[in-house]
Amino acid sequence: MKRIILGSVSSLALMLSAGTAMAQSSGNTATINQQGASQSATTDQTAARLSTATTTQSGASNSAGTTQAGGDSLSVITQSATGNGATATVNQNRSQTLFPRQNNDNGPSNSSRITQDAAAEDASASLTQMGELNQSTISQSGGATATTSQTGIANESTTRQTADGASATVIQAGDPAAGGPGVGFGDNRSRVTQNAAASAFVSQTNTNVPDGSPTNESTIMQSGDGSQAITLQSGDNNVADVTQDGEDNYSLVDQLSNGSSATVVQSSDENVSLITQRGTGTASVTQSGGNTLGSFGGRNNNVAVVDQRANAQGAEANLTQDGELNLATVTQNGLRTKATVSQQGIYNTAGVTQTGQDATATVTQGGIAGGAYGDNVASVNQSGANTTATVNQQGGPASIGPRFTNIATVDQSGGGSLASVAQTGAGQGANISQSATSSDAYVLQIGGSAPGTAADNNAGITQSGNEQLAGIGQGGTGNTGSINQSGNRNAAGIGQAQATVGNPEAVLMGNLSSVSATGFASDNNAGITQSGDDNRTLVLQSGDGNTAGVTQGGTNNLVLVTQSGTTGQAYVTQGGTNNDALVNQSGTDGQAYVNQGGTSNDALVNQGGTGNYAAITQ
């Protein structure tokens, strides 16, 4: 047994100051070096072999305690703080050694290092190791609190604190916690860096046999006061990386399975990020922007929520919030789903739910020309496989409040469908519902209202069947368009704006290259209902106050309605096969009615002037 006590005071004074070293088996080494007054150091090595405890204190009112029971442990405590009340406690306990020292017995089974320096008052560090091959480092240069608990095998924890008021707790374990070859491994990695009065909590539990790389990895970096970061990992090969540069932020990462990855960056204040992962998903949240507007909708700034459930293997969610008081929610429970949400400006809300495999959703929200407004709401629900949804919303200036909100809703239950909504302006609504397979739907809305007023354009598309195509384009104010299609391979389009169309047939095939918008139109109303197969309808309203209604069934029928005047009315009902109906109204108060059935009929109505009336029945 070797016992060494070195100090600048006499042996009697050292004994009276409660500096004690106890070793009860051969090969133990305890070294205590104290300089200053009112210090206390306790080292207790019980039934341990090849254990080493080193305690160095320089300052005032420090306290250090080390207890080692088990095999091959190393504990080093260094206190050089000039402030009062720094305390450090190490407890290492392992009653059996399942893994011998490596490299010719040169490395310890458990290793702990606590360093407390600088003018830090009331710093506190507590470290408990109940296993083997664990490593822990705590470094404090501020009045901080750190607690580390390691149970199992091959855990690694590093905590560095430079600010008063910082708090960090790290818990690492294997499952079962008793350890043993092939079970109870920890193999977790945690790194916490705190340069502000923030709090961090890390809990890592490995439920699988290690594969040579870290089982779970957690990194937390905090430089903003009042921020909280919580990382919970239970499983294998999970990675979490949290950076909080702003103040009063909150981050929760909860990984409950294997192979998940989460990244959180919060650079502005009072943001909230919640990530839950139960599959092999990837999630990223980035939050920035100011916070000058107070609270809204129960939140103090940006809120991001990602929920990747058990079936979300290979899922990916990317949320970026660069503004104020935005809300984004992504729920994924399908294979290889992907959701991207980007929010700029203020008061934006986006929700994406994906349960169909290989679904992709992209939501972009902001203000016109990057302005500091938004006030957009988007909801995307994808239960069909291989669906694609894109929503782009740019809110109008000086248009804040429910009256001016752009709202876009997309619901896709049919496989292979595509939906796109683009809104620019304020106070517009778009809804796309697709149960049809391999079908496309498009809505484009450009509000023509003055700043601070609502455009009041509304568009709705509903599709069932197979291989449908529908599109609605609105430029102006007060326009309403709706398309309802069933059957197979039908195509329908509504244009409500001043525009030229060079090739209507190409437009009905989804080619808009011949369309050129020249101005706005207002208060038009168009509705198209199509069933049957291979029918096509196009309604173009470039005037104001016009109404068009088309109902079409049968097979391979065509309807084209053009209204460039004002307050015109056109109604077409068509069935049968290979029928064509064309209505052109350029005057005022014209009325046209076409009703066709049978086969290969043609109807043409051309109205100019005022108050014209035409009716065709075939």
Image (tube, rainbow, N blue to C red):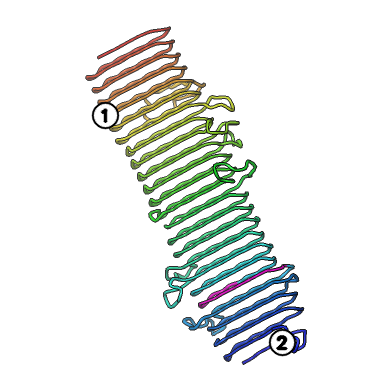
The span shown in magenta is: 120-136
Give the residue displayed 61% in from the left and 37% down from the top: 372
Task: Indicate the position of residue 171 as horizontal and vertical percent values.
Answer: 53, 68
Mark found first going from the N terminus, 1 or 2: 2
State the image quarter where residue 483 is shown.
Answer: top left
Q: Amino acid at mark 2?
A: Met
Task: Indicate the position of residue 132 as horizontal and vertical percent values.
Answer: 51, 78
Task: Indicate the position of residue 461 as horizontal and vertical percent values.
Answer: 38, 31
Which residue has dot 1 on it? Answer: 532
Task: Indicate the position of residue 578 as horizontal and vertical percent values.
Answer: 26, 22
The one of 135 and 513 positioned closer to us in this rendering: 135
State the image quarter where residue 42 is shown.
Answer: bottom right
572 in magenta: no
Q: Residue 15: which numbered mark, if any? A: 2
User: Element at badge 1?
Assistant: loop
Left or right: where does residue 452 sit relative to residue 470?
A: right
- Dominant SS of magenta comes to strand
Left or right: where does residue 355 sit relative to residue 107?
A: left
